Image (cartoon, rainbow, N blue to C red):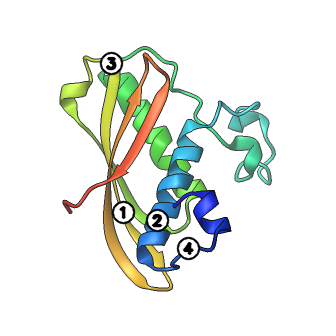
Amino acid sequence: MSLMAKLKGQWRGDVDDVRDAIIENLSAVLSARAPMWKNTELSPQLCNSIAAFGMVSSLRSQGKSSSDVILHDVKQLIIQFEPRLKEVVVDLDENSVATNKLMFRIEGLISSKFGEEVVVFDSSLDFTTSSLDVRKTNLV
């Protein structure tokens, strides 16, 4: 759901809108530029704040070990900045390791006022175009 739809009053306020809002937030969190400071330079109070917002390791060379580090960072950012998504699992598509487009799946449990629902987001991080794609899938 876009910001314009919310401003026009087209926000339904159901679990689909919560899911769409989570996708928007995940896209923003994972697309953010690297934080200005590394977590080791921050005081404990600032480590969980906007000062640590963004991915640090996405510019590393592509390969299995780098992919694991990148996906670990993805999971940590989701846990830190998307509290509506619980029990987060990020799985790598092994076939994408040799390409310039890292494919992965984000799975989790949405916890909202509507209850709990398992969701799966098929995602990709394209190093050639520096773009991120997060899409919901119907397969759970």
Amino acid on which disc 2 is placed: Leu
Is disc 1 surrounded by few (<14), some (14 to 19) or many (20+) residues within 10 Å? some
Q: Which residue is mark 2?
A: 85
- In this rendering, the label closer to the viewer, 4 or 1: 4
The answer for how far apart the CA atoms under marks 4 and 3 are is: 41 Å
Marks 1 & 2, CB-CB < 8 Å contact: yes
Assign a secondary structure to mark 2.
strand
- Number of marks in the image? 4
Assign a secondary structure to mark 4.
loop
The answer for how far apart the CA atoms under marks 3 and 1 are is: 25 Å
Residue 11 circle label = 4
Rendering coords of residue 83 (x, y %): 56, 66
The answer for how far apart the CA atoms under marks 4 and 2 are is: 20 Å
Which numbered disc, 3 or 1, marks the residue that appears first in the sequence?
A: 3
Report the residue at 58% width, 46% height from top: 29
Amino acid on which disc 1 is placed: Gly
Q: Which residue is mark 1?
A: 108
Marks 4 & 1, CB-CB < 8 Å contact: no
Please name whichever residue, 138 or 67, is drawn nearer the observer in this view of the structure.
138
Report the residue at 56% width, 37% height from top: 31
Q: Quadrant of residue 3?
A: bottom right
Is disc 2 surrounded by few (<14), some (14 to 19) or many (20+) residues within 10 Å? many
Is disc 4 surrounded by few (<14), some (14 to 19) or many (20+) residues within 10 Å? some
Rendering coords of residue 124 (x, y %): 36, 35
Establish if 7 lies above or below 61: below
Q: Which residue is mark 3?
A: 63
Image side of residue 117 versus residue 74, left or right: left
